[in-house]
Amino acid sequence: MLPEEKRNSVMLKLEQGITDNLEAGVDILYSSRSSVLNIPMGSVTATVYGPGSANVSQINPFFVAPAGSTRTAETVRFDAQDLLGTSSQTASGANTFYAFGHLEYHIANNWRVTASTLIGTDRSYSNTIGGCAGAAHCWH
């Protein structure tokens, strides 16, 4: 039902007192996620009309109603995956990195001055291999 997914995450926190009044610290986070999804070939659903149908221009000469049935139409579905397997895969994932650094100077009587910075990047990707981009149904 769901594709296999791999996740890896690491977090690192460092703090150091430089003097009695000055502290420095850094928090670093890295995370990656990846998955591969097999995409089926696709399926076709159609209505087949037989003799006696009101859709005279679409009657299929090979239509045979089940024994004892008076049906003049049948809906059929063809799933190519059962015959041909999957045709393509989608590989997707994300990589995230953040680093937060700060300096804190303690002034007398519970006052402090803090300077901080945050840098980061987040990259998501999705690649379809062996498929038809933008096509609702893809037949090879």
Image (cartoon, rainbow, N blue to C red):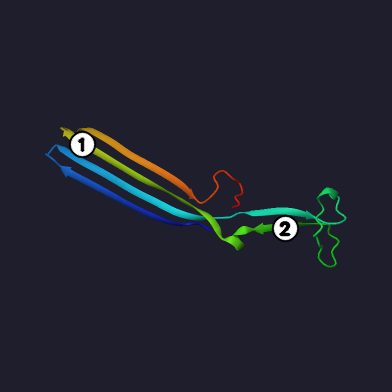
Q: Nearer the viewer, mark 2 or mark 1?
A: 2
Residue at 81% over, 65% down: 66
Image coords of residue 58 (percent x, y)? 81, 50
| Helix, strand or loop for disc 1 | strand
Residue that appears at 85% across and 50% down: 56
Q: Please tell me the numbered disc located at residue 76.
A: 2
- Label 2 neighbourhood size at 10 Å, few (<14), some (14-19), many (20+)? few
Q: Nearer the viewer, residue 82 or 130?
A: 130
How much space separates mark 2 and mark 1, taking CA atoms? 69 Å
Does residue 64 sit above or below 112 in this rendering? below
In depth, the one of 94 and 57 nearer the eye is 57
- Residue 74 — which label? none
Residue 84 placement, left or right of 95:
right
* Residue projecting furthest to the bottom: 67
* 49 on left or right of 94: right
The quadrant holding residue 61 is: bottom right
- 69 on left or right of 32: right
Mark 1 crowdedness (10 Å alpha carbons): few <14, some 14-19, many ≥20: some
Identify which residue is drawn at 17% across, 39% down: 23
Mark with earlier residue (2, 1): 2
Residue 34 lies left or right of residue 87; in this view the side is left
Q: Looking at the picture, how far across and down is residue 65, in whole percent?
A: 82, 62
Q: In the picture shown, does residue 57 fall above or below 111? A: below
Q: Quadrant of residue 98?
A: top left
Residue identifier under label 1: 103
Measured along the vertical axis of the image, is residue 18 above or below residue 81?
Answer: above
Kind of residue indicated by mark 2: Val
Q: Three-letter amino acid code at disc 1?
A: Leu
Q: Secondary structure at mark 2?
A: strand
Image coordinates for residue 123, horizontal then vertical, percent:
39, 42
Taking the spot 29% from the left edge, 37% from the top edge, the residue there is: 118
Residue sitting nearer the eye, 20 or 83: 83
